[in-house]
Image (cartoon, coloured by chain):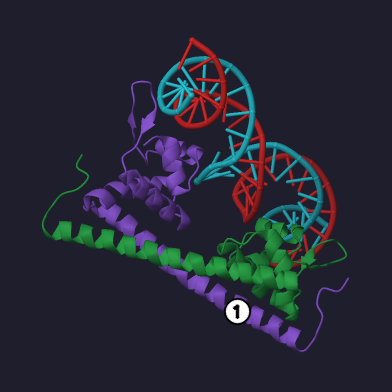
Chain colours: A purple, B green, C cyan, D red
Amino acid sequence: MRIGELAERTGVSVRALRYYEEQGLLTGERSQSGQRHYPDEAVDRVRLIQQFYAAGISSASILEMLPCVVTGVASPEVLATLHGHRSSVVRQIEELQETLRQLDSVIAGAARSHESGVPCQPG
Amino acid sequence: MRIGELAERTGVSVRALRYYEEQGLLTGERSQSGQRHYPDEAVDRVRLIQQFYAAGISSASILEMLPCVVTGVASPEVLATLHGHRSSVVRQIEELQETLRQLDSVIAGAARSHESGVPCQPG
DNA sequence: TAGAAACCTGACATTGACGTCAGAGGTAGC
DNA sequence: GCTACCTCTGACGTCAATGTCAGGTTTCTA
C-alpha cells in the first residue's frame, strides 16, 4: 500500500509516517518514481511505534529496540535498555494509578457537594 | 520557605516553580523585597501539579481543576473535565499495561536467545 | 561589612513529534 | 490526454515545559 492508505489504516498522519522513516523506524520499498510502498505488516509496526511513543520512549530508544522486537535477540546493552524502559513503564502505571485515585476522590467530593446543593465557581 | 527550598524539597527546578506561578498554578506570598515565600502545603501542591503533568494534563486544565481539588466543589463543566481526564488516565494505564506485556515478551525472547547462545547485534 | 549565595525579571534557546506550506512530479478514472 | 488526487522533498512553524543567560537586588555568613 502507499503512504496515504497506511496513514488511514493506522490513524497516523502522512507527515508522521515520513518522520518515522526519517528516524529509521519505518523503512519502506520505493517505486521507480520514488513513492513509498509498504507491506501489510507495516500497520503493526506503526502501531508498535505509537505504543512506545505513548510510553514516553524516544525515537532513538525505539530504534535501538526494534531489531530485537523483530528478531527476538538482544545484546546485553539492549537488554539493559529494555529493562530500563520496563521499569519506567511500571513506574508510570503506578503514578497514573495514584493520579486516578486522586481524580476519583476529587470527583467523589464534587459529587457530594452537588448532592448537598453547594454551588461552585460563582460569578 | 523560599523558592530554592521548595525546589529542593519537591525535586522541581526553580525555573519550573516560577513557570507554575506564571500559569496561575502556584501562588506564593511575596516579601517586601519581592521574594516568594511559600507555606509547607506548597510542597503537596507542587507534587500534585507534577502528577497531573505526568498524566498529560495541560497547565490550563490543571488550573481549571485546582480550585475543586482544594475546595471539593465543582461546576458541571469542571466535573466534565474531571471525568474526561479520568477516562484519559484509565486509557493510558491500559495502553501502558499492553506496552508492558510487549516489553516482557521481547525481554523473555531475548533471554531465551541468550540461554541458547545466540549472539545479537554483531559488529 | 564584605562577599558569597540566593533571588528577581525578562528574554531567548531547546527538545521532540509532528503541522503546514510551496513547488514539482506521479497516478488513476474518464 | 485531462483532471483530480496523491505523493515527493525541503524547509520553516508550533507547542509546552522547561533550560539558560544577563544584569541587577536581597539575604545570609564569616
Residue A9 visible in the picture: yes
Q: Residue at x 36, y 37 (%)?
A: A1
The quarter of the picture where residue D11 lies is top right
* Image position of A40 with respect to B10: above or below: above
Q: Is residue A101 left or right of residue B97?
A: right
Total tally of numbered discs in the picture: 1
The secondary structure type at the circle numbered 1 is helix
Residue pointed to by mark 1: A104
Q: Position of residue C30 (x, y in %)?
A: 48, 24
Q: Nearer the viewer, residue B107 or B31?
A: B107
Q: Residue at x 75, y 80 (%)?
A: B73
* Residue at the farthest bottom position: A116
Q: Nearer the viewer, residue A94 or B12?
A: A94
* Image position of A121 with respect to B57: above or below: below
Where, quadrant-wise, is the C terminus of chain B in this rendering? top left
Q: Nearer the viewer, residue D6 or A100?
A: D6
Q: Position of residue A32 (x, y in %)?
A: 33, 21
Q: Residue at x 65, y 79 (%)?
A: A107
